[in-house]
Amino acid sequence: MKFSMTPLLYLAQIVAIYRATRNTYDSGQISARQNKQIVLILAMLTLWGVLSAYLGISGYYQSEGLLSSLPGLWLTQIPVLIVVIPWLVSKTLRQGIDAIVDHTPLYLIMGFEGLRILAIGGIIKGYTGEFSSFFSKFVGIPDFLYGVTTLIAAVLIFKGVWKEKSAIIINLIGFIIIVPFAMVLMNVGLPGAMYMIEETPSLATILEFPMALAPTLIVPIFAMVNLFVALRLMKRQRSDRAIERSGALALNSNG
């Protein structure tokens, strides 16, 4: 087992999301039920993280059957299902998540996404021969650069230079880096139908503990934050445009 920031990164994610939820609840913007829904989802993600850690430590993730099953396409989706299924079923939860996005300053959200600069750890390991060089180049570097971009965006949004439209574009880019590119590229270095890249160390190192927590938990959480934030900001912009149009029509009719 090699040192990795991944467990600490997950802890930072959970603490940040919980604090944003709690602040929104304390301000009266979400109900006790919505607060409990989100806390329950965080608890389920943590339980999955514990199980994923166990599967990584036990060697299950290194089994031939698992590695050849295109895990980049399905294993990465387990935390997504933990969040998205309740989100699709519960209108109350959807409204709660929207309220959290609305209540949390946008520059803080972008700062949270800036945690992706920690992809630098995987890049360094790729160049020192501890991790897949292919994955570190084609996924790690874009992810690191995205993290840098979001930190710059956080500063510019805080200063009022950039607006919501810029945040929408940046969040969509962050989502696309992971879905579909990282999901697909994860499989090309593993035995299976998509195997194309042979290297030492192989891409199977991404499923060694503690690195395994990145594709099975941490990265999907970042992708979901990207998606939820982009969707909410686009919805707000549509609503603002509709209000502007209705106001313009009212002025014209009065005129």
Image (cartoon, rainbow, N blue to C red):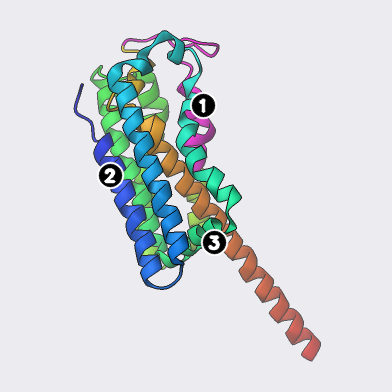
> Quick one: quadrant of the C terminus?
bottom right
Q: Position of residue 240 (x, y in %)?
A: 61, 70
Residue found 35% across the figure and 22% down from its top: 207
Q: Residues within 10 Å of mark 1 (few under 14, many from 20)?
A: few
- Could you tell me residue 138's position as x and y percent? 42, 26
Report how many numbered discs are placed on residues in the image: 3
**Quadrant of image for the N terminus:** top left
| Dot label at residue 95 | 3
Magenta range: 175-200
- Point out the tag, 2 or 1, that comes first from the N-terminus: 2
Type of the residue with mark 3: Gln
Q: Identify the residue under disc 2.
A: 11
Q: Label 1 belongs to which residue? A: 74
Locate residue 41 relative to residue 91 in the image: left or right.
left
| Figure check: 29 above or below 175 | below
What residue lies at 47% left-to-right and 33% top-to-bottom? Answer: 78
Q: Earlier in the sequence, mark 3 or mark 1?
A: 1
Q: How many residues crowd around disc 3 within 10 Å: few (fewer than 14), some, or many (20 or more)?
A: some
For badge 2, the amino acid type reads Leu
Q: CA distance from mark 2 to mark 1?
A: 23 Å
As helix, strand or loop, the secondary structure at mark 1 comes to: helix
Residues under labels 3 and 1: Cα distance? 28 Å
For residue 72: magenta? Answer: no
Relative depth, front residue between 106 and 149:
106
Instruction: Say if residue 190 shows up in the picture.
Output: no
**Residue at the spot x=54%, y=61% of the render?**
95
